[in-house]
Amino acid sequence: MIESENPNTLDEPVIQTILRDLKMIGFKLYHVILPRGNAANVLRDWDLWGPLILCLVMAIFLSISAEEQKALEFTIVFVVVWCGAAIVTVNGQLLCGNISFFQSVCILGYCIFPLTIATIIIWIIQNFTMIVKLPIVGGAWFWSSFASYGFLGSSVPESRRLLAVYPVLLFYLVIAWLVVVQ
């Protein structure tokens, strides 16, 4: 059998598939943690496993810390992340962006990683005052916004870049607000 660039994955064991996917998720998270200018093509090979896991982790931790209506908190986080990513993506498409819908949702989903980490930190060390929460979540918001700009900034024409970035900043700001008020 000749090995090709795109091997047939139907014959591989499930554990090998899971490990390959986890490795790709880790690789993409690495580029979100350390965004560089040459990483624009990293998330072109999109997947939604990483964003789904990050969204679920954030929603679970925020719903655990909710005093009442835990299911509602979980639902709000889940809907805000996925519908917000879809709206921001459609905005980018309407501004003549050259990135596909799922690539954009993938990028926006992976870039919530810093906010997910902030959620976990605030959950672990509970009873934070607002003065302590704001710098943690503010830094995570900045990091998420900066990382997503590195990926999405080049997908929109220069003259429309601000119109594309502003909704991204608002998207992460809404998620950051959900984390702060937990």
Image (cartoon, rainbow, N blue to C red):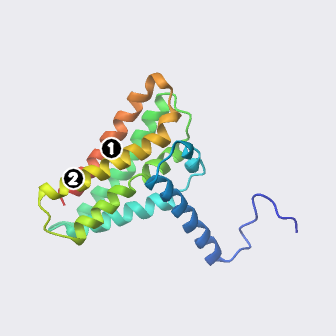
Amino acid type for the residue under numbered disc 2: Pro
Residue at the spot 43% in from the left edge and 48% down from the top edge:
108
Circle nearer the N terminus (2, 1): 2
Amino acid type of the residue tagged 1 in the rendering: Phe
Instruction: Indicate the secondary structure of the residue bearing disc 2.
Output: helix
Q: Which mark is residue 171?
A: 1
Q: Position of residue 36 (x, y in %)?
A: 50, 46
Residue 98, picture quadrant: top right
Q: Residue furthest right?
A: 1
Which residue is tagged 2?
A: 135
SS under mark 1: helix
Front-most of residues 177 and 69:
177
Label 1 Cα neighbours within 10 Å, binned few <14 / some 14-19 / many ≥20: many
Residue 89 place in picture, x, y as percent: 45, 40
Q: Which residue is rendered at x = 32% and y = 46% of the image?
A: 142
Is 72 situated left or right of 108 in this image? left
* Relative side of 165 to 72, left or right: right
Snapshot quadrant of residue 60: bottom left
Local packing at callout 2 (Cα closer than 10 Å; few below 14, some 14-19, many 20+) is few
**What is the quadrant of the C terminus in the image?**
bottom left
